[in-house]
Image (cartoon, helix red, strand yellow):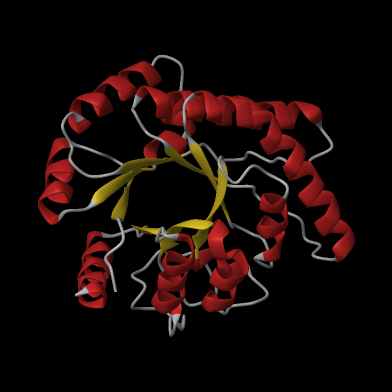
Amino acid sequence: MNTPPILVSILDLDQRVADEMAQKGLGIELSGFAFPEVLAEGALEKNIKETQKILKGFPYPVTMHGAFWDLRIAVREPMIRQVAEFRMRQSLEIAHELGINKVVFHPNYTSRRSDEEMKRYWVGQQIEFWKALQPNAQKHGITIYLENTGEPTADHIHQILNQLDPQVFATCLDTGHLNVFGDNKNVVDWVNTYSHQLGYVHLHANFGKRDEHIAYTQGNMDFTGFFEALANIEQSSGTHPWIIIEVKSREAYLQSYEALKRQYD
């Protein structure tokens, strides 16, 4: 089994962390630029310049998590939607300044309903929103990955992507989110539903009650067949989904890293 690109989601990047990632042959997903305080006027330019300095000469892939806090897309209030659009366009511009061409966003399913009527409304609102952002992404050569958060099934994002340009849009499968919020907890089913649309994986686990972001070797999730399903995507499409270790502690990151080394040895 070929080793795919493996990255680690980093909230507070510094030179020591970047050097450790490079020593281990790991890429970096920048998650700090998703936070309003990092994006605040007066702080953003400084944060971009510091990040550029740290990443200068970094030899492995760098991606970015786009803004998501409190950003809702499928809403009646147009001003809320405008804020979401502003922040996400801003994320694309930041990524461009940092030389990044892969950005993850949350479609942010927040409804208490999961019936077909709500699904049709939510999918329709999403398609309109992401099509409006497509020119910005294309301008900078960026691929946008839509990540499952509260969506009850993989088919929600699958249907959105069916109506978007596959050269610009793909999906990020968040394994921990599906275990907490998904009606279907079978991670292989989600992989197979997305199939060639899947290009990016946030790998972590939990016990199904809350989004804990612990090592994927812990929790109550069953990953049987998961890595084989990812390899099948590579066999059919020629590209293996990138794997991003997205955990909250150093211990969980090291556990995940060692487990992935064993998996791909």
Query: Could you tell me which residue is drawn at 79 percent across and 40 percent down?
Result: 75
Q: Is residue 116 left or right of residue 8?
A: right
Residue 228, given in percent of the width and then of the height, sits at 41, 78
Residue 217 in sight in this render: yes
Residue sitting nearer the eye, 230 or 17 = 230
Q: Is residue 235 above or below residue 28?
A: below
Which quadrant holds residue 85? Answer: top right
Residue 117 percent location from the top left of the image: 89, 59
Tally of numbered tags: 0
Above or below, 215 relative to 45? below
Q: Nearer the viewer, residue 193 or 27?
A: 193
Q: Is residue 221 left or right of residue 180?
A: left
What residue sits 62% from the left and 40% below the top? 70
Using the rendered image of the protein, determine whether residue 109 is visible from the camera's viewpoint.
no
- Residue in the image at 41% along x and 58% along y: 239
Q: Residue furthest right?
A: 117
Vertical side of 108 occupied by 156: above or below: below
Q: Is residue 30 above or below residue 39?
A: below
The quarter of the image holding the C terminus is: bottom left
Q: Is residue 242 left or right of residue 50?
A: right
Q: Quadrant of the N terminus?
A: bottom left
Residue 247 lies in quadrant: bottom left
How far across and how far down the image is residue 2, in percent? 28, 68
The answer to whether 197 appears left or right of 42 in the picture is right
- Residue 164 % position (x, y): 68, 44
Looking at the image, the residue that sits furthest to the top is: 42
Point 46% across, 22% down: residue: 40
